[in-house]
Image (cartoon, rainbow, N blue to C red):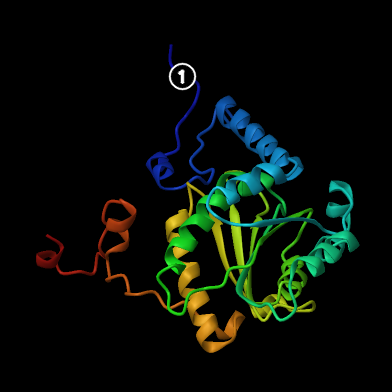
């Protein structure tokens, strides 16, 4: 029996992206399989937003790679407050502020503090935070002078700016916030990294550097760690972050090498190229 689905003529392009393209049609509608896949993706995105952060599991994973942890909470008392009041997720509650004051000795300072916040996807934290930090620490271990790493703050119901308060309380020169990004319809597990030099409450987004889409199907933990290590070293050397700090990769990608690195077939050359050069 002939299938009622009429394939799109550019169906082959679906092998290069998770975007919903070339779905085809059945009559005047989407094919049933495509419709069901969209519903599943929407459900996975909603689940990622509502999934509680497993603070004890995250702490155990970090301790297994040699990191101390502090379990903190934002001023947003629960998920509903977090979603309705973004401002509450940007600062710590009173108990967490007190815990930070008690854990830092007078005069103690750190080069970098890592803050983990659930953001809009605890799933991203559960799957990606520990592997990312393990790769970062391996890279920083070769730096001179050595990095003094603060205990990792694990913040429930936290947003990016909560790292400013935590980093300042930990007396850290730089703070890096690992946070679950807003789920897309193909990426419920995407982790974002936000680096801020001299953290303190009131820092703006223009004073941060961002690395996004850290996940197995996006930017790998190893690649993100290498990029973050470069930014950390630059921030420490230049004593700044944000729009004034640009990543400096070790080497430029040669022209035309993108397709090879991505495993794609060569892009068709321009028709204006002479025939002898096209061969």
Tell me: residue 52, above or below residue 157.
Answer: above
Tell me: residue 274, above or below residue 85.
Answer: below
Left or right: where does residue 77 sit relative to residue 33? right
Mark 1, residues whose alpha carbon is within 10 Å: few (<14), some, or many (≥20)?
Answer: few
Q: State the image coordinates of residue 73 (x, y, percent, origin top left).
A: 81, 56
Tell me: residue 277, above or below residue 64.
Answer: below
Whether residue 216 is visible to the viewer of this picture, yes or no, is yes
Q: As rendered, which of 161 and 21 lies closer to the eye?
A: 161
Residue on which the image places disc 1: 3
Q: As rendered, which of 174 and 267 lies closer to the eye?
A: 174
For the C terminus, the quadrant is bottom left
**Total numbered circles:** 1
Q: State the image coordinates of residue 11 (x, y, percent, origin top left).
A: 41, 39
User: Which residue does the image show at 25% across and 62% down from the upper left?
Assistant: 269
For label 1, the SS is loop
Q: State the image coordinates of residue 12 (x, y, percent, origin top left).
A: 37, 41
User: Farthest left residue?
Assistant: 276
Q: State the image coordinates of residue 95 (x, y, percent, origin top left).
A: 88, 59
Whether residue 184 is visible to the viewer of this picture, yes or no, is no
Q: In which quarter of the view is residue 26 placed?
A: top right
User: Which residue does the image show at 42% across and 74% down from the upper left?
Assistant: 143
Left or right: where does residue 77 sit relative to residue 217? right
Tell me: residue 68, above or below residue 5.
Answer: below
For the N terminus, the quadrant is top left
User: Which residue does the image show at 64% across and 32% down from the upper left?
Assistant: 40
User: Farthest top residue?
Assistant: 1
């Amino acid at each position: 029996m002939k299938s009622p689905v009429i394939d799109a003529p550019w169906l082959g392009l679906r092998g290069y992206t998770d975007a919903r393209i070339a779905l085809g049609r059945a009559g005047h509608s989407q094919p049933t399989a495509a419709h069901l896949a969209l519903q599943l993706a929407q459900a996975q995105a909603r689940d990622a937003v509502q999934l509680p952060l497993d603070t004890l599991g995250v702490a155990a994973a970090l301790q297994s790679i040699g990191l101390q942890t502090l379990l903190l909470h934002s001023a947003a008392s629960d998920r509903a407050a977090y979603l309705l009041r973004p401002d509450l997720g940007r600062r710590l509650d009173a108990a967490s502020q007190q815990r930070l004051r008690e854990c830092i000795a007078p005069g103690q300072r750190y080069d970098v503090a890592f803050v983990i916040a659930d953001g809009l996807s605890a799933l991203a934290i559960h799957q990606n935070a520990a592997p990312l930090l393990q790769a970062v620490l391996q890279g920083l271990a070769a730096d001179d002078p050595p990095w003094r790493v603060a205990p990792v703050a694990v913040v429930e119901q936290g947003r990016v700016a909560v790292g400013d308060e935590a980093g300042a309380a930990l007396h850290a020169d730089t703070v890096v916030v690992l946070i679950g990004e807003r789920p897309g319809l193909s990426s419920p597990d995407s982790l974002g990294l936000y680096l801020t030099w001299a953290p303190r409450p009131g820092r703006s987004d223009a004073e941060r550097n961002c690395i996004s889409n850290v996940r197995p199907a996006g930017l790998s933990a190893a690649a993100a760690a290498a990029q973050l290590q470069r930014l950390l070293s630059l921030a420490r050397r230049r004593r700044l972050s944000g729009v004034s700090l640009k990543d400096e990769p070790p080497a430029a990608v040669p022209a035309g090498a993108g397709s090879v690195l991505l495993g794609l077939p060569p892009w068709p050359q321009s028709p204006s190229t002479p025939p002898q050069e096209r061969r």
